[in-house]
Amino acid sequence: MSNVLVAEEELKALLVGELGLVDEAEFERARLMATRLKMPLERAVAERGRFPFAFLLEQLAQAWGVGFIDLKVSDVHLEALKTIRDEYAKSHVVVPFEQAGRQLKVAMVNPRDRVLIKDMEQMTRLEVVPFLAPEGTIRRAQLLYKGNLRELLERSTVQASTEVKRPLAAGGPGQPGKQWTAGTGGGTGRSQWGAGTDASEMVTQLLEYAVVTRASDIHLEPYEAEMVIRYRIDGVLHEVLSLPPTAQAPVTARIKILSAMRIDEHRIAQDGRFEADLSGFKIDLRVSAVPTQWGEKIVMRVLSREAASADLDDLGLAASDHEILLRNLMRPHGMILVTGPTGAGKSTSLYAMLRRISVERQSGVNISTVEDPIEYTMPRVNQIPLNVAAGFDFASALRALLRQDPDVIMVGEIRDRETVEIGVRAALVGRLFLSTLHTNDATAAVPRLLDMGVEPFLLASTLVLVVAQRLARRICVGCRESESLDEATMKLLRARPDYEHTIELLRQQGVLGAGPDPLAEARTFRGKGCEQCRGGGFRGRVGIFELFEINDQMRQRIMERQDGGSIRAAAAAAGMRTMFGDGLAKVFLGETTLAEVYRVAM
Ligand SMILES: [Zn+2]
């Protein structure tokens, strides 16, 4: 299979000539970048052209007269999957995902491959309708070929958790290699998930299921009478499976071996990580084991390599916020901070920012990071892992790094005064310094840093932008429907002190109409549940942001050590789109629900 989806000249004719999405010079720069970063040209063009990669593929598909699908695992109908053999699909990078009568929809990396299409038609005796899909999504969907996984997916997550609860099998705890029964005996005659598998297979299946459900974390929780396995999907924990306690010791041991932890040590907390290759789809896992009353609780954080390649445009920034962010990323020096709780997508945003800097400023700059731990590997970035046990902490790593002549520095997190002081000094002497901080909103970063002991005049002269962010679940587009606001909701909104101001901003931005009562005319949306979202009404997530840009007026306020409340009021008065305002805009635009905004952004 060739990696070249589209010939350079053809891509140029389409994008520069026909669609006018980028100009010729821009296209040439993208070509250079593609060579330098060893990435596909179409991806480089998308990054330079500042539009999402999926959009570019959509345009290509349109030009070729074929469909485009940003394939999700839930788009794949299992009946359709069976029409083409596993090995064939993998070697040709295709996935059949839907069958309607004599027609078979197939996701392909190269939907113009007539020979391949003919071949599949002969094989399946169906008419193949080719769809262009990103390669990563095809590879992920191919994991569905695993028989056991398929069975798991045929049941809903909720079903799984009830069905597999069974009386304990005989035999005491902690007998490695002993079989356990978690199956339902569903009458298919096939081997059930967990039945008769050993710990190693079991862990592989847990990881595969995490990949297809796009889980971000896997929790293995030991209790007296069961081991509960829960996955965090789109920010919410779902119970996936309950195993008898006999399963706990071998599964835990297997994960500890993979993560290079001491398996004979059960009384202290341990950390580790490993890489898993799931039929060609690679993920990294960061693992934590903590002793509890009933044994070690394990949490595995799934670090998908796709997240590392997230583009700024995929984060869900409003156009005005996107502009503010880009403007500040292109500064030669200063301090940019991302704030929010754990799981708010801060790392993904920071990586997207570094990628954009690397793209825009070409090879003229050195980008270095200090991370604990390194979450994603990035091309052409010097990434330094911490080793706190050996005394190599954020502050000492950062001090050493400054002697290495970097232009752009990203430090995983500001945890202490020393780190922030070195960061401020770096920003003062001409570096761009990026990091994260735990505060509720963007403006709160100022009082927090002042409390940490940073001098007001130093902060005022270095801080340029604070981005606060949260992730809300995105309404499934497969079953989205609109509804008018009910009285209670309107009342709740009107009672907010920032109501008038927020509504006025949303009117100016064209999100709400100009009528006398904008709420009465507004509509909100919800997902009523469908096959694509497995009934939940949500699919994927959308970022909710607040960008606090430090202008001269704000600098003055920082120097005067004004309190957090006055700084926030001044920023809002100056037109800052607050996190609540951004969330509300996304509610009226049908991206998420008000309940989600209240859940994450309050
Ligand atoms: Zn749906």
Image (tube, grey):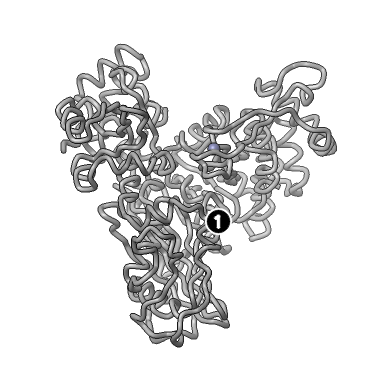
- Is 313 situated above or below 287? above
Horizontal and vertical percent for residue 502? 74, 31
Q: Residue at x 36, y 14 (%)?
A: 20
- Is 527 situated above or below 225? above
- SS class of the residue under badge 1? helix
Q: Residue at x 42, y 38 (%)?
A: 75
| Residue 91 falls in image quadrant | top left
- Position of 340 compared to 155: left or right? right
Query: Disc 1, ligand 1: is the CB inside 8 Å?
Result: no
Q: Residue at x 72, y 18 (%)?
A: 513
Horizontal and vertical percent for residue 318? 57, 30
Q: Quadrant of the N terminus?
A: top left
- Judging depth in this view, the residue of 403 and 113 nearest the camera is 113
Give the quarter the ligand 1 occupies.
Answer: top right
Q: Residue at x 82, y 17 (%)?
A: 516
| Residue 568 falls in image quadrant | top right
How many neighbours does mark 1 have within 10 angstroms: few (below 14), some (14-19), or many (20 or more)? few
In the rendered image, is residue 399 in sight?
Answer: no
- Position of 345 compared to 446: left or right? left
Per the image, the residue denoted by label 1 is 158
- Judging depth in this view, the residue of 112 and 262 nearest the camera is 112
Q: Amino acid at mark 1?
A: Val
- Position of 159 compared to 135: left or right? right
